Amino acid sequence: MTTVIAAAPPRRRAATPSQLTWRSIRMALLILFAVGVLMPIYVVLVTSFKSPADFSVVDAWNLPARLSFSGWQAAWEALAPALARSLVLGVSAAVISSILGSMNGFVFAKWRFPGANVVFTLFLFGMFIPYQAVMIPLQQLMIGLNDTVPALYGIPTLIIAHVIYGIPICTLIFRNYYATAVPDEILEAARVDGAGMWRIYSSIVLPVSAPAFVVTLIWQFTSAWNDFLFALFLTDRNSGPVTYALQELASAQNPDYSRMMAGVLIASLPTLLVYILLGRYFVSGLMSGSVK
Amino acid sequence: MRNRWQGLAMVAPSIVLVIVFVYGLIGQNVATSFERVTQKTFAGNEKVVAQGGVANYADLLADPRYQHALWNLLVLTVVFVGGTMLFGVLWALLLEKGVSGEGFFRSVYLFPMAVSFIASGTVWKWLLSPGIGDHEAIGLNRLFLMVGLPGLQSRWWTDPGPFNMAAMALPAIWQLSGYVMALFLAGFRGISDDQREAARVDGASEWRVYRHVLFPQLSPIALSALIIIGHMSMKTFDLIYSIAGQNNYVADVPATLMWVQLFQQRNAPTAAANATILLLIVAVVVVPYLVYTNRTEGAKGR
């Protein structure tokens, strides 16, 4: 399902007094909840602009007495190399798994083979498995692979893992998209004209795939960027992505709160930007996970 | 007549990858869980780390720390699922008829989902600091002091009581309530206005319209939300790792305990058995769900 939440239909009748009361109560509640949800963001912002000397327990919630960028600078220095690695990881994992997802989705929607249903359900289950259940052998397998091809150690290994475990969700998104967006008649017509499967895929289906690609690219980029479990099992501090580096920064013995909070923002900015700029598609991706 | 087997060729690379890396590795993990492991002690004797066979599972299930982790997981899951459903449905109800600023509220409620558990865990570690009183309290406890409600201060998840994990569900609820809201909002908007109008014309009160017209149609969405949030709860690892640290008895769940068993106790068979049980719990819930969705889709003539 790649529907996006539709806007509410326009209200018709004029409001009665009791409806007006309800409306104000509703608005008050909505604002109250919004303040609650935004509260951690306030804390992060305020703390990140305090200098370690200025931070005190008593006025932890107050605005900084004077703006300090030392936390930001320290966090940037600590996270920059890992940020670059996460960028490579997120983009590569997103592109490769989207291409695979598109091919699979086309087959499961339009070029089904006998038993396709069973295979598709087996794929879907892969979306739900706790990664803990494959982690130990995966680590052993990857250590072996890295020994054979040392260049694979670190981010390339993580890319492989995210591509493989992203296959189910990407396949699902593309299958649902092709099922509704590409009419069978067009494919029939192409076949009558003598086009084969690859030709039909590359010249008819692929050119109209942009909307689904946007969704899977965003989804895969975000989940690769935010992942920590694979990073912890498959990389180390010198080769890990930004979640790994942030965790190191945050678990330091003497916490420097301004550096920690600035680090949280720096590590979250790319996915927050994706969410703010492409929120519509981000939501589509979230909804696709619900197997509708 | 087109060659139907051609499609198989196009999916073949993915099928191989899924067979090897999902089902193959699950099999490998199960095999590991039955292994026997011994270590040499200083005195030169052999110490049995894992007995091997089914005994590995029996030993794990008998381990008080594992039982504690299972209890924690149950508390976490109940509060996490209950909390996200409560806030998700409530927010969807508040928004579903359309209010001014709807897009803003939707975005605000949903944004925590874009943030990694490691990043939000770092913030919530601070917010849920256990310090109490004027000299120690930061985070939420300090906020309670400031607004004159010192009685609300809490040791949060660090309190070794039976329900300490309920506090650990707070950040999880913060992060995923918006997701449940989005699912339900899409559900409400998918029901045509005519149905509500028809019920109103028949004299149904607003409550009865929800109770008898809207809610029954939303049960598939409620089921999806339960499955998704529930299985996420089973896997919870990042959040607890970043809030409570790597090895913290009080906040143990099976997923974090597995990490301890593997890397600190050097006991791969027990860690593998732990992971297998986790997979079984998820499978018991998810497999019937997948079969059910498959059937209903088939019934729709797909």
Image (cartoon, rainbow, N blue to C red):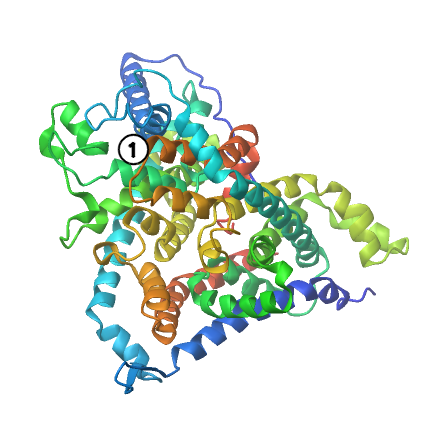
Of residues B189 and A97, the one nearer the viewer is A97
| Residue at left offset 75%, top offset 50% | A184
**Outermost residue toward the right in this view:** A193
Q: Is residue B198 visible?
A: no
Front residue (pair B150, B105): B150
In the image, what residue occupies the spot 27% across and 74% down? B60
x and y, in percent, of residue B23 in the image: 53, 70
Element at label 1: helix
Residue wearing tag 1:
B207
Q: Residue at x 57, y 47 (%)?
A: A220
Task: Decide: is A56 above or below B125.
Answer: above
In front: A56, or B141?
Answer: A56
What is the three-letter code of the residue carrying label 1?
Trp
Rendering quarter of residue B146:
top left
Q: Which residue is situated farthest in the front direction here?
A: B43
Q: Quarter of the image containing the C terminus of chain B?
A: bottom right
